[in-house]
Image: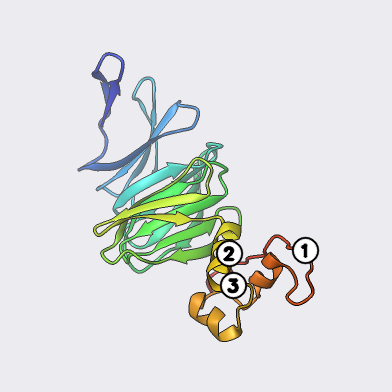
Amino acid sequence: MTVWDTDRFRTRMTMKGHEGAAFGVEFSPDGRTIASVGEDSTLRLWDARSGRSLAVLDNHAGMTFDLAYAPDGRTLIMGINDGTVHLWDVRTRTRRATLDISAGTVYGIAVDAGGTSLAVANSDGTVQLWDIASERRTATLTGHTLGAITVAFSPSGSTLVSSGNDTIRLWDLDAGRATRHICDVVGPAVDRDRWRKLMPDVPFDTPCSQTYGDIGTGGPARRPRFRVPPDP
């Protein structure tokens, strides 16, 4: 791996240790450490100033294509080609958790600016959202037909972008805004059958009546409630 001086456009240092290609590299939020993963199934930490090897956290993880630090720098997250994501405690250098993502390969991961949500792009074409604190999946986004490769949050965290072998897709993560858009299209009343066709994975909760006011009473409009249950 090579670190470049972007002001002078020249090499600062070269770090050797991976056997084969290094697929993913990431600076820690404080800029002091570089984490890398690659073809040799290792997760490595390097001193960002000297290039000195600091640690090999995992030497049998499986081929890894991407990794990301949580914004506070305490957690390092890596996606594996066996369909799992590993969360590492950087301070203790121990694996904190393993998330079972899919039966395919994890290609891309991203953490939002608040450090609360993890997005995972998978070879099966899905993009999954996970709550980092509870280690629970909160949503599965479908649409890519040839695999999802990379994923990134907008700075505000309200939009997610994913790319695959077929398309680049933008996802609106603001549940309230999505609900209001649906209500604008279908009107203030949605019966159970219509709800099931529009949002089969979300429990019937008649949010449009809450958006436009109590139907038939002329009551004031209230902010819609919207719940996306975790996948079983």
Disc 1: which residue: 220
Question: Is residue 78 visible to the viewer in this orientation of the structure?
Answer: no
Q: Identify the element where label 3 is drawn.
A: loop
Q: Secondary structure at mark 2?
A: helix
Up/down of 17 relative to 220, above or below: above
Whole-number angstrom distance, CA of label 3 to CA of label 1: 16 Å
In the rendered image, which residue does mark 2 sit on?
Answer: 179
**Residue type indicated by callout 3:** Gly
Mark yes or no: residue 147 visible.
Answer: yes
Q: Which residue is mark 3?
A: 187
Position of residue 137 relative to residue 22, above or below, is: below
In the depicted structure, whether residue 199 falls above or below residue 29: below
Q: Quadrant of residue 84?
A: bottom left
Residue 224 percent across, percent down from the top left:
67, 63
Q: Quadrant of residue 193?
A: bottom right
Label 2 Cα neighbours within 10 Å, binned few <14 / some 14-19 / many ≥20: some
**Left or right: 133 with respect to 23?**
right
Ranked by sequence position, the earlier of labels 2 and 1 is: 2
Q: Residue furthest left?
A: 20
Q: Residue at x 37, y 57 (%)?
A: 121
Do the numbered discs 2 and 1 sit on residues whose CB atoms are within 8 Å?
no
Q: Is residue 5 above or below residue 70?
A: above
Q: Give the left or right position of residue 62, taking residue 141 as reference.
A: left
Question: Badge 3, how many Cα within 10 Å: few under 14, some, many 20+?
Answer: few
SS at circle 1: loop
Q: Residue furthest bottom?
A: 193
Marks 2 and 1, Cα distance to the nearest angstrom? 17 Å
Residue density around tag 1, few if under 14, some if 14–19, many if 20 or more, within 10 Å: few
Mark 3 or mark 1, which has the lower sequence index?
A: 3
Residue 156 or 18: which is nearer the viewer? 156
